[in-house]
Image (tube, helix red, strand yellow):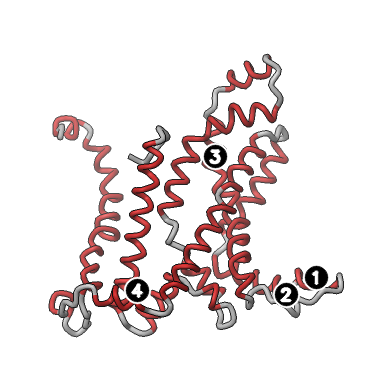
């Protein structure tokens, strides 16, 4: 470590201290509590004095009749979100990049960015309002064509689609910002040369814009796959009910119910740790594959 350089630029390192403190306190220090996944944690005895039980809670989870349902629902929702939601911001950014009217472009950006700032509770309330079988606007349109109302939020068959598409609507505009920034970094002279050579706008998108943002796409894809099992708890829990439980019961909601509602802290910690380890393995694997294919990687 070059202490001379650090001393010379100590002001810059002081700016890093709040961020370092945040990660140490809220991300690394809590790792100390992971040991309760291997213990029968008793709040009255504390973490250190609770008895060790090894992999008891992991085995209990793997043997549970809910294990495969939880895994299936979590993976299906994650893959569905990735397949549908990942390309949309890219397409949106490419389309907005081709808009020449500054006023129209700002309007589209405002409209697509705005849902990102709506809280999850409000989003779910809006879904309940618009998708209600009795009073929902969408079902009013459906019944006007002589068809029966669709119970979107109480049907296991519709739960994943409603969850994913509402998520795409909420976050696609905001996620497109980073791709727009990457597109702005492409050398305009490349486009000028392509125009002189007779390239159409579509050809310039495929042969200049997409290759130009491809490194960004790879990095974000690695990060998304690394969070494949980390399906958002709050939205699923708010949309969940007894009628759609076959499709909505995921690892995150199961951990909440067993850990918070039933106070089985050690079991919930074991399930959460298993979920995090799967994410970590996926992140390492995809990053390794990207590196092996000579693409951008995280490290």
Residue 8, picture quadrant: top left
- The residue tagged 2 is 150
The residue at 29%/55% (across/down) is 22
Q: Distance between the residues labelled 4 and 1?
A: 43 Å
Q: Please, what secondary structure does the residue beneath circle 3 have? A: helix
Does 287 sit above or below residue 77?
above
| Residue 32 pos. (x, y %) | 21, 65
Query: How far is the residue under mark 3 from the one under mark 4?
Result: 40 Å
In-image side of 270 versus 73 (left or right): left
For the N terminus, give its image quadrant.
top left
Alpha carbon separation for disc pair 1 and 3:
36 Å
Name the secondary structure under disc 4. helix
Residue, disc 3 = 179
Q: Do the residues labelled 4 and 1 touch (CB within 8 Å)?
A: no
Task: Identify the residue under disc 4.
Answer: 62
Verify CB contact (< 8 Å) between mark 3 and mark 2: no
Asked if marks 1 and 2 touch (Cβ < 8 Å), the reply is: yes
Q: Mark 1 points at which residue?
A: 142
């Amino acid at each position: 470590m070059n202490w001379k350089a650090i001393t010379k630029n100590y002001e810059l390192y002081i700016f890093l201290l709040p961020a370092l403190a945040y990660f140490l306190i809220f991300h690394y220090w809590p790792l100390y509590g992971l040991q309760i996944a291997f213990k029968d944690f008793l709040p009255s005895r504390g973490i250190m004095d609770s008895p060790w039980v090894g992999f008891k809670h992991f085995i209990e989870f793997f043997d549970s009749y809910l294990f495969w349902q939880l895994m299936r629902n979590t993976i299906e929702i994650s893959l569905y979100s990735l397949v549908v939601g990942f390309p949309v911001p890219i397409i949106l950014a490419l389309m907005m990049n081709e808009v020449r009217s500054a006023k129209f472009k700002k309007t589209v950006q405002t409209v697509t960015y705005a849902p990102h700032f709506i809280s999850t509770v409000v989003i779910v309330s809006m879904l309940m309002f618009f998708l209600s079988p009795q009073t929902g606007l969408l079902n009013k349109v459906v019944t006007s064509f002589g068809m029966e109302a669709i119970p979107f939020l109480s049907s296991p068959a519709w739960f994943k689609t409603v969850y994913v598409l509402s998520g795409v609507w909420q976050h696609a505009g905001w996620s497109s910002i980073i791709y727009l920034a990457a597109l702005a970094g492409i050398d305009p002279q490349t486009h000028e040369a392509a125009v002189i050579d007779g390239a159409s706008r579509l050809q310039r998108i495929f042969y200049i814009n997409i290759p130009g943002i491809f490194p960004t796409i790879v990095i974000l894809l690695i990060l998304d796959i690394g969070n494949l099992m980390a399906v958002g708890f709050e939205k699923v829990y708010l949309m969940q009910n007894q009628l759609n439980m076959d499709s909505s019961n995921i690892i995150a909601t199961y951990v909440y119910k067993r850990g918070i509602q039933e106070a089985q802290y050690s079991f919930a910690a074991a399930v959460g740790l298993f979920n995090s380890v799967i994410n970590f393995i996926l992140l390492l694997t995809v990053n390794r594959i990207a590196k092996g294919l000579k693409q951008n990687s995280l490290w």
